[in-house]
Amino acid sequence: MNLWLRLLHLIIASFVRPKLDPVRDVSRLTFRVWPHDLDTSLHLNNGRYWTLMDLGRTDMMIRSGLWRPILRHGWVPVVGAGQIRFRRELKPFRAFTLETRILTWSDSHVVMEHRLVSQSKDGSLILNAIALVRAGLYDRRERRFIPMDRLLSEIGLRAEVPEVAPEVEAFLRAEETLKSAA
């Protein structure tokens, strides 16, 4: 239930938060680790990281205006691959920020980065976890992923594909290797 409350809060807050350019801007959402987020080691549950990242992508879709064509056309967001690196645990009641941004894209998929960061007692930032996700919007009627140029045009944007960083190339190669192993 708590995730539904977080989603409801995100939707309501999106009415007063500034619009996002999904190609250039970073979505920042603040959270706190509540007791229902914990695992048996009494820190943020590994699965909860992924669920919170769903909210980061949702924020990006809502605040960029992409939610309108998603609803109009009946498209479905689909995550095809993800990789996470845990750096520092998040303990109960700890406040943290989820940062979500698009790094690059192919014809029909984006690669997004999610960072969970918190503040140390001296005020410096701590990277708690970082993840890369490959995702797209799927049209069930046409049985295909929506091309990125169409997604951008639906919200009135044009952009060149950003240069791919080495860690993103490695992530995509690993994902292709794993896909072909099935």
Image (cartoon, rainbow, N blue to C red):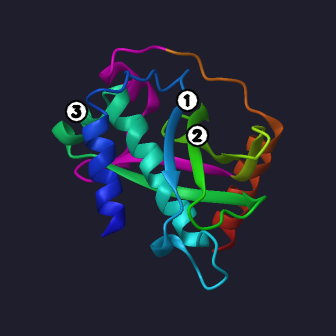
Question: Identity of the amino acid at label 3?
Answer: Arg
Q: Picture coordinates of residue 27 (x, y %)?
A: 50, 34
Mark earlier in primary sequence (2, 1)? 1
- In the picture, the quarter occupied by the N terminus is bottom left
- Residue bearing mark 2: 99
Residue at 78 percent across and 58 percent down: it is 87
What label does residue 75 carry, if any?
Answer: none
Q: Residue furthest bottom?
A: 40
Q: Check residue 159 for magenta coloring.
A: no
- Residue bearing mark 3: 68
Q: Are marks 3 and 2 in contact (CB under 8 Å)?
A: no
Reply above or below: 34 against 10.
below
Q: CA distance from mark 2 to mark 1?
A: 6 Å
Question: Of helix, strand and loop, which one carries label 1?
Answer: loop
Magenta-tinted stretch: 130-158
The reply, left or right, for residue 133 in relation to residue 75 is: right
Question: Identity of the amino acid at label 1?
Answer: Val
Q: Check residue 144 for magenta coloring.
A: yes
Question: Of helix, strand and loop, which one carries label 2?
Answer: strand
- Residue bearing mark 1: 26
Q: Are marks 2 and 1 in contact (CB under 8 Å)?
A: yes
